[in-house]
Image (tube, helix red, strand yellow):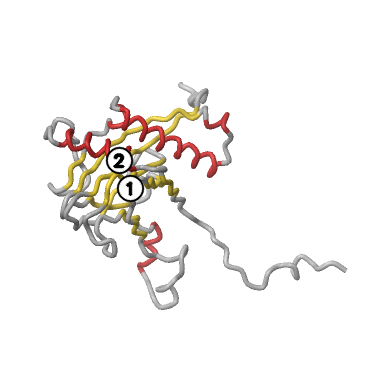
Amino acid sequence: MSDSPSSARPEFQVVPTFAVPLVICHLPDPEPLNRELRTLFASIEAQGDTYANPEPFVARNKELYESNFTLFDWPQACVQKLREFCLRSLYRAIGELNGYDTAMLQRLHIATESWFHTARKGGYFGAHNHPLHSWSGVYCVQHDGDDPETDSGKLTFINPLSMATTYTDMAVANLKMPYSYAMRKDRLVPGQLVLFPSWLLHEVMPYDGDTQRITVAFNARFKLAGAQPAQVPRP
C-alpha cells in the first residue's frame, strides 16, 4: 500500500524563499586591456572637469574621481572591448535567470549609462542604488597598494533584509547564509565583473592604499522589440 499524501511530507524542512542574484564573471588575461584602460582614464582625468560627472548625486569626496555617464559610447578600442565583455556577460545572465533562448534575447534592446571611478587614499562612494534600470555592473580595472585583509575599497552590498533587524535576539543573531542579515563585502580583483539588480543598495568602503582603485560601472534597461503599450480608452 502506498504512503498517503500526509505521510509522504517531510517531517522538517527549511525552504529558501527569496534570493538576490549576484553574477560573478572574470575576463581571461585582463592585464593588457586594463593597462590600456588605465592609460586612457589617466589622460581623461588630467583634463579636469571636461569629462567629469557634471551633476554628482551620491556622497563621495575629492579623493574619488567620477567620469560622465557616456563611457560605453567612447570610440577607443579598449572601451569597446570592455563594453562587449560586460554586455555579453549581462545578456548571458539574463538568459540563464529568465530561461530565455537566443531568439528572445535578441528581442531585448538595451540602453546603458556607464562611467569610471578612480579612488585614491581615502576615496569612497556612499550607499545608493540605480533607479529606472534593471541591472547594474562593476568591473575592476585596478585594486592594489592596500591591505587585502581590511575593508579597504570593498564593494559592499547592503542586505535587503536589514529591516528585519528592528528586533534581534540570539535566535536570529547568527543565522547562516543565505539567511544572515549581514552585508556582503567583496574585494574585486582586476578583470572581475559583478552584475546585480539595480535596486540593490551598495557602497564602496574608503580605499586605504597608496596607489589607486579603478572601476568601471554601468546601468542597463531593456525594451522588448515589438512590444506595444496598452491602449487606454479616452473619453
Q: CA distance from mark 2 to mark 1?
A: 8 Å
Give the residue number, with chain letter if any, for mark 1: 190
Q: Residue 213 or 224: which is nearer the viewer?
A: 213
Tag on residue 74?
Answer: none
x and y, in percent, of residue 163 in the image: 37, 62
What residue appears at the point 29 percent right and 56 percent down from the top-left corner?
A: 154
What residue appears at the point 45 percent right and 70 percent down from the top-left corner?
A: 175
- On the picture, is 112 further left or further right than 96? left
- On the picture, is 215 further left or further right than 54? right
x and y, in percent, of residue 99 in the image: 58, 41
From this view, report whether residue 227 is shown above or below residue 86: above
What residue appears at the point 75 percent right and 70 percent down from the top-left corner?
A: 7
Disc 2 crowd rating (10 Å Cα; few below 14, some 14-19, many 20+) is many
Tag on residue 34?
Answer: 2
Asked if marks 2 and 1 touch (Cβ < 8 Å), the reply is yes
x and y, in percent, of residue 19 in the image: 48, 55
- On the picture, is 189 further left or further right than 88? left
Which quadrant of the rendered structure holds the N terminus? bottom right
From this view, report whether residue 48 is shown above or below residue 75: below
SS of the residue at dot 1? loop
x and y, in percent, of residue 139 in the image: 34, 44
From this view, report whether residue 75 is shown above or below residue 189: above
Earlier sequence position, callout 2 versus callout 1:
2
Q: Quadrant of residue 35?
A: top left
Q: Amino acid at mark 1?
A: Pro
